[in-house]
Image (cartoon, grey):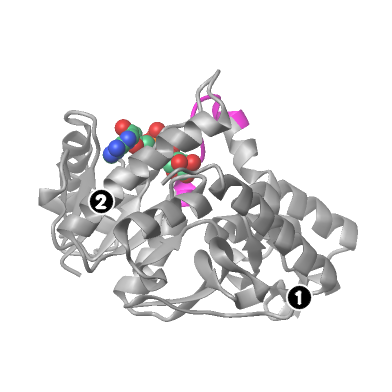
Amino acid sequence: MERITVVGAGHVGATAAQRIAERELAREVVVVDILEGVPQGKALDQWESAPVEGFDTRVTGAQGYAETAGSGIYVVTAGLARKPGMSRDDLLRKNTEIISGISKEIARHSPDSIIIMVTNPLDVMSYVAMKTTGFDRQRVVGMAGILDTARFRSFIALELDVSVQDIQALVLGGHGDSMVPIVSTVTVGGIPLTEMLSEERIEALVERTRKGGGEIVKLLGTGSAYYAPSSAAVQMVEAIVRDKKRILPCAAWLEGEFGLEGLFLGVPCKLGQPGLEAVLEVPLTDAEQQALAASAEAVRGTMSLLSL
Ligand code: APR
């Protein structure tokens, strides 16, 4: 791919740009931020690591979007973090403004691009991007499920003292608190997790995963997780750039799958060169179906606060 743009040169964005460059997923990575000098400074610093790391992907920074023209993918991480005294609604309003502004620029400068939404609340921000750009659902996908499953897999690996590579897991629904882990699908080297751990232990790991974001926030004191979130976003980039047809849990616009439509929600997605190639359905128990419906209601509740 000729060019990939990362919007937002903060923790998640800068780390995503670095991972994209180090894996040479494009000839150029452009990092855009409203902060004067910051995207240019981080980009230059990353480019200066190229001779040591051995990558040839050019890393550049910009305040505007002319430099991003013709990008195949935009990873959108720009936004505000919630500050003391700021309500969730204030944050939603502010981030909606930011994401719709960015989406207009994307549609103008790279009308054929694919958007990977990372900014929270990502299900709703994905909707804002889809609505503002007019892109179809193939070209707007949100990042959450890969991060939630990665956290779950990392905790299972610690518990069982086995390689993370051998652990497969699937979570559906919203990000974090409202995620719906499909425990029957979790396997360790092909063996069902339920054969290896008690129900109580599995529930404890699920609970830790649900609160995984909060655990990091608490430890850091300021800011939130960015290493694992950027890894997750870049896995989506790689699936698209290399047309891998990977099956990954991502937030996709639903058109009747799982009995739901008209919202973004975490579901198993097939990602390849055109973006979202398909949403895959899995059989759910009644409890899982109910949990997914509750997750959908939470997303719809936030969507109803939007004035687009
Ligand atoms: N255009 C471009 N960049 C913007 C804009 C805008 N309109 N508005 C804000 N930004 C930039 C900020 O200047 C900042 O550099 O977005 C960046 C956000 O970075 P951080 O505050 O470090 O946040 P980060 O930890 O990277 O998280 C970004 O990802 O995981 C989600 O919940 C998280 O929504 C948050 C997003």
Residue for badge 2: 104
Q: Quadrant of ligand 1?
A: top left
Residue under the point 61% across and 61% down: 149
The reply to whether residue 242 is visible in this rendering is: yes
Q: Badge 2 local density, few (<14 within 10 Å), some, or many (20+)?
A: some
Magenta residue check for 203: no
Q: Nearer the viewer, residue 171 or 129?
A: 129
To which quarter of the image does residue 237 belong?
bottom left
Disc 1/disc 2 C-alpha distance (Å): 38 Å
- For the N terminus, which image quadrant? bottom left
The reply to whether residue 11 is visible in this rendering is: no
Residue for badge 1: 284
Residue under the point 56% across and 26% down: 87
What kind of element bears circle 2? helix
Residue 236: image location, x then y, percent = 41, 65
Query: What span is colored magenta in the figure?
Result: 218-229
What kind of element bears circle 1? loop
Q: Quick check: 146 left or right of 136?
A: right
